[in-house]
Amino acid sequence: MNHKLKIALVFLVTNALSATVMAHTGADVHAHLGFISGLVHPILGIDHLAAMLAVGLWTALTARRASVDLLWAPAGFAGALLVGATVGLSGLNLPATEPMIAASLLMLGLLVISRLRLSGGAAASLVGGFAFFHGLSHGHELAGQASATSVLAGMLCATLLLHACGLALGWTLRSAPAWAARIVGTSTALLGAGLLTQLA
């Protein structure tokens, strides 16, 4: 088995083993203490990890060439995540937050499977809509905490790092058999569908 396929299968197994987790793990599970806590949280939360990697993966798979087009969706996700977190810090939370986080995994998985090409603005808007709810959940958790700004800074850095990792994985899988990326996309979509079922 070549190295590219091994990477895809490791991603699949990681998602499959985590299919029973909540759509979002709250502040009662992860104490938010500062920048490092914020940096680690998206990496340890499978919902955030899978979503952020999938954004980069989908972007790289559908890019016509290595250019500024690779930045639209990741930048849209990170920007909307920050906006959502800022809104959440005001204490606002919406009933649909958890389902939207789970739905983001389902949608992103389907985008990876289909390799649907969108314009840069459309891609940024689509993933940004879901990212808003990821950020809203974080911000709501952190409302009133003195360390909120440093925690969010760490989360934003982790988000950008995970997007970069997804871009690297996607660029690697561009030259692999199409089914390799479909396996990764399918595992992400199934994770999202499983979480939606739990929340129903």
Image (cartoon, helix red, strand yellow):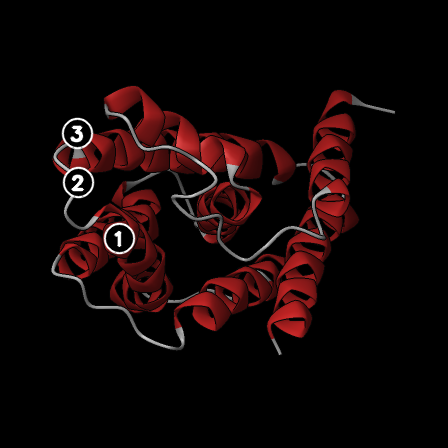
At which x and y percent is residue 14?
Answer: 71, 36
Q: Nearer the viewer, residue 55 or 168?
A: 55
- Residue behind mark 3: 150
Instruction: Identify the image quadrant of the N terminus.
Output: top right
Residue at mark 3 to residue at mark 2: CA–CA distance: 10 Å
Q: State the residue at coordinates (43%, 49%).
A: 63
- Callouts 2 and 1 close, C-beta under 8 Å: no
Residue 81 is labelled as 1
Three-letter code, disc 3: Ser
Which residue does the numbered mark 2 point to in the structure image?
145
**In this picture, is 48 found above or below 108?**
above
Q: Percent x, y for residue 166? A: 49, 37
The C terminus sits in image quarter? bottom right
Q: Earlier in the sequence, mark 3 or mark 1?
A: 1
* SS state under label 1: helix
Tell me residue 37's x, y (percent): 34, 26
- Disc 3 from disc 1: Cα separation: 15 Å
In the rendering, at what x and y percent does residue 111 appear? Answer: 55, 63
- Label 3 secondary element: helix
**Residue sitting nearer the eye, 182 or 100:** 100
Q: Residues within 10 Å of mark 2 (few under 14, many from 20)?
A: few
Give the mark toward the camera: 3 or 2: 2
Residue type, mark 2 in image: Gln
Secondary structure of the residue carrying numbered label 2:
loop
N-term mark: 2 or 1: 1
Depth check, mark 3 against mark 1: the one in front is 3
Which circle's residue, 3 or 2, is located before the other in the chain?
A: 2
Category of crowding for the residue at label 3, using alpha-carbon neighbours closer than 10 angstroms: few (below 14), some (14–19), many (at least 20):
some
To which quarter of the image does residue 194 belong? bottom right
| Kind of residue at badge 1 | Leu
In this view, the residue in front, 96 or 66, is 96
Q: CA distance from mark 2 to mark 1?
A: 18 Å
